[in-house]
């Protein structure tokens, strides 16, 4: 993991890319946000966005549940919470990640929309050596 | 996630509690499709749900569409503020029939 992101680290965890481990990540993130006084709505929104991003890693980057790792780093940087997710899957093409039209009522495809709607910034950054992808999500407190 | 399905006054009630997430949504999807296939009106009571993600929402949408094909009433009840927010984000709050709680849903389905 990139060891030099800005801000104060609140928590850093590594977990297997499996659906039954996402709850652990959600709780760690929620507790970290609560630690710095984030509101319930802020916490719920950020947790959903990060959970959806982790699901994308499991389902699309890794191609299914695996024991390969997801690294989550949560920092407070000024008036924002910054979450970085690192995986070791093949690099994704960010231009291919687009939300679908919500007018089309059908199962699936909502995760990317949720992420875009619930965080202020979303960017793939240069991953650390040996890693596949580094997704940074930023949510401002106000 | 905990799930309980029961018959009540000529309809099916599926009560959910806990986290409806990627770990549990495949089980939910399967159960809802079985329940819809029975042909009775369906109420999904979400009163105990503390968290729902896109996979949980997708399970509800798929069951809703299956019910619509069979012309069976399919409604949701007891959404918490956080679950309601997810439905609004997905713009599904105007697609689903949503009741404030299970009692109201049962009255409306009588």
Image (tube, rainbow, N blue to C red):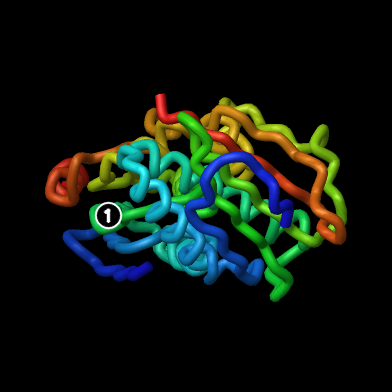
Residue B25, position as x, y percentages in the image:
50, 62
* Residue B87 place in picture, x, y as percent: 41, 37
Quadrant location, the C terminus of chain A: top left
What is the x, y in percent for residue B88?
41, 31
Left or right of B6: which side holds A51?
right
User: Closer to the camera, A14 or B4?
Assistant: A14
Q: Is mark 1 on a helix, strand or loop?
A: strand
Residue B63 in sight here: no
Q: How crowded is mark 1: few (under 14 residues within 10 Å), some or many (20 or more)?
A: many
> For this rendering, which residue is in front, A46 or A128?
A128
**Where residue B24 sits in the image (x, y, percent)?**
48, 66
Where on the picture, by quarter, is residue B16? Answer: bottom left
Q: Is residue B99 left or right of residue B96?
A: left
Residue pictured at 65% horizontal, 34% vertical: A122
A94 left or right of B1 in image: right
Q: Quadrant of residue B39?
A: bottom left
Q: Mark 1 lies on which chain?
A: B
> Considering the image in quadrants, where does the N terminus of chain A appear?
bottom right
Disc 1: which residue: B45
Q: From this viewpoint, which residue is outermost toward the bottom?
A: A67
Toward the viewer: A24 or A142? A142
What residue lies at 30% left-to-right and 70% top-to-bottom?
B4
Please state the total of marks drawn on the protein image.
Answer: 1
Residue placed at 32% from the left, 45% from the top? Answer: B75
Relative to residue B4, is residue B71 depicted above or below?
above
Residue A31 seen in the figure = yes
**Residue at the spot x=59%, y=53% of the render?**
A73
B13 is higher (above) or lower (below) than A49: below
């Amino acid at each position: 993991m990139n060891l030099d992101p800005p801000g104060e680290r609140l928590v850093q965890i590594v977990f297997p890319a499996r659906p039954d481990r996402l709850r652990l990540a959600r709780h760690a993130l929620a507790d970290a946000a609560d630690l710095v006084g984030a509101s319930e709505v802020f916490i719920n929104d950020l947790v959903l966005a990060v959970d959806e991003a982790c699901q994308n890693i499991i389902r699309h980057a890794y191609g299914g549940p695996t024991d390969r790792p997801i690294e989550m780093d949560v920092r407070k940087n000024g008036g924002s919470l910054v979450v970085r997710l690192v995986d070791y899957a093949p690099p994704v093409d960010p231009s291919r990640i687009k939300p679908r039209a919500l007018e089309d009522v059908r199962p699936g495809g909502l995760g990317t929309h949720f992420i875009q709607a619930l965080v202020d910034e979303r960017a793939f950054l240069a991953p650390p050596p040996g890693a596949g992808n580094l997704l940074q999500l930023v949510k401002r407190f106000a | 996630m905990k799930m309980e399905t029961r018959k009540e006054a000529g309809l099916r009630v599926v009560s959910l509690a806990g986290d409806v997430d990627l770990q549990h949504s495949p089980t939910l999807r399967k159960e809802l499709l079985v329940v819809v296939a029975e042909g009775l009106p369906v109420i999904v009571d979400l009163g105990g749900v503390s968290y729902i993600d896109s996979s949980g929402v997708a399970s509800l949408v798929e069951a809703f569409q299956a019910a619509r094909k069979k012309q069976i009433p399919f409604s949701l009840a007891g959404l918490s503020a956080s679950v309601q927010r997810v439905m609004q984000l997905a713009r599904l709050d105007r697609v689903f029939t949503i009741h404030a709680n299970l009692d109201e849903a049962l009255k409306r389905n009588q």
